[in-house]
Image: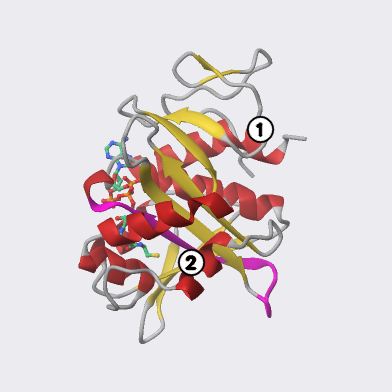
Amino acid sequence: MRRFVKMGPRILVGESGRIGLGLVVEPMKDRFELKLRDGTPVIVRPLIEEDRPLVAEAYRRLSPEARYQRFWTRTGEMIGDVMLDRLIEQDPEKHVTWVVLDPAREFPGVGGASWWRNTTNPQEVEISAMVLDDDQCRGIGTLLLAVMWLTALRAGTERLVAYTLMDNRRAANWMRDCGGKGDWDGYKLCFRWDLHDLDSLPVTLAAADLAAWLAELAPLILEAE
Ligand SMILES: CC(C)(COP(=O)(O)OP(=O)(O)OC[C@H]1O[C@@H](n2cnc3c(N)ncnc32)[C@H](O)[C@@H]1OP(=O)(O)O)[C@@H](O)C(=O)NCCC(=O)NCCS
């Protein structure tokens, strides 16, 4: 089994606590200052109660297509309270939602992802991810996938599963390129990742990016006190 080691351009946290592009980060629990591959500094952290307006505004800013691809509903620009509660109310054993924020922007939200633990099969979590339209293809989805992977491992689970509509080619290609094993259940595509198996990650840019983030974030998420 492969361990979480350096892959790609980033540098694994060393004894000095030095990571990434020369940034020194204290191991703060669950709030990370990172850099996207284009050098943009971002903050990655779980959603908190005070983020309700941020989530509502991010939902409003999505294109109708992206909103449908993530939420499978065409109910307009306003997120309902039930969905908002479902995203924000968290339990690290059962459900988490993390966001990527660009603190230099007036509206900092650029993406978010969640997982929910399967109640009948607690070894499995279902993930979903969302990146604002203009920020897609910058590596934010893959960063969020790495965070979902590690927080699910930390919760003691073994598999990620993600569902996508058949015509959502962008998400399906991305999940496949990140190493998800895909099945068609007659209604939707279902991708699965074994969290302990890094050996079967494919040789793609997305999987190299994913492995690099796993290497960088594993000490912060799995080993933080
Ligand atoms: C699916 C989604 C989350 C992906 O997020 P993203 O931020 O665009 O993903 P990334 O930027 O990490 O990866 C996208 C592409 O960049 C490419 N990429 C990754 N690393 C790269 C690198 N170093 N250099 C160049 N390209 C790279 C990836 O290969 C990927 O291309 P591919 O899809 O052809 O494999 C996003 O498109 C989205 O929010 N869609 C709408 C909602 C949705 O469909 N959600 C999924 C269902 S829950």
Residue drawn where x is 62% and y is 37% of the image: 218
- In the shown orientation, is residue 88 left or right of residue 53? right
Q: What element carries label 1?
A: helix
Question: Alpha-carbon neighbours of circle 1 within 10 Å: few (<14), some, or many (≥20)?
Answer: some
Question: Is residue 71 part of the magenta span, yes or no?
Answer: no
**Residue of label 2:** 84
Q: What element carries label 2?
A: helix
Question: Alpha-carbon neighbours of circle 2 within 10 Å: few (<14), some, or many (≥20)?
Answer: some
The extreme bottom residue here reads 186
**Region of the chain picked out in magenta, as a range:** 119-133
Q: Which of marks 2 and 1 is nearer the N terminus?
A: 2
- Point out residue 43 in the picture as x, y percentages from the top left corner: 47, 35
Q: What residue type is labelled 2?
A: Leu
- Point out residue 141 in the picture as x, y percentages from the top left corner: 38, 49
The extreme right residue here reads 225
Residue 141: tell me if it is visible.
yes
**Residue of label 1:** 219
Q: Which amino acid does label 1 sit on?
A: Pro
Q: Is residue 116 above or below residue 132?
A: below
- Point out residue 190 in the picture as x, y percentages from the top left corner: 43, 72
Tell me which corner region of the image, top left, top right, bottom left or bottom right, holds residue 15.
top right
- Point out residue 61 in the picture as x, y percentages from the top left corner: 26, 56
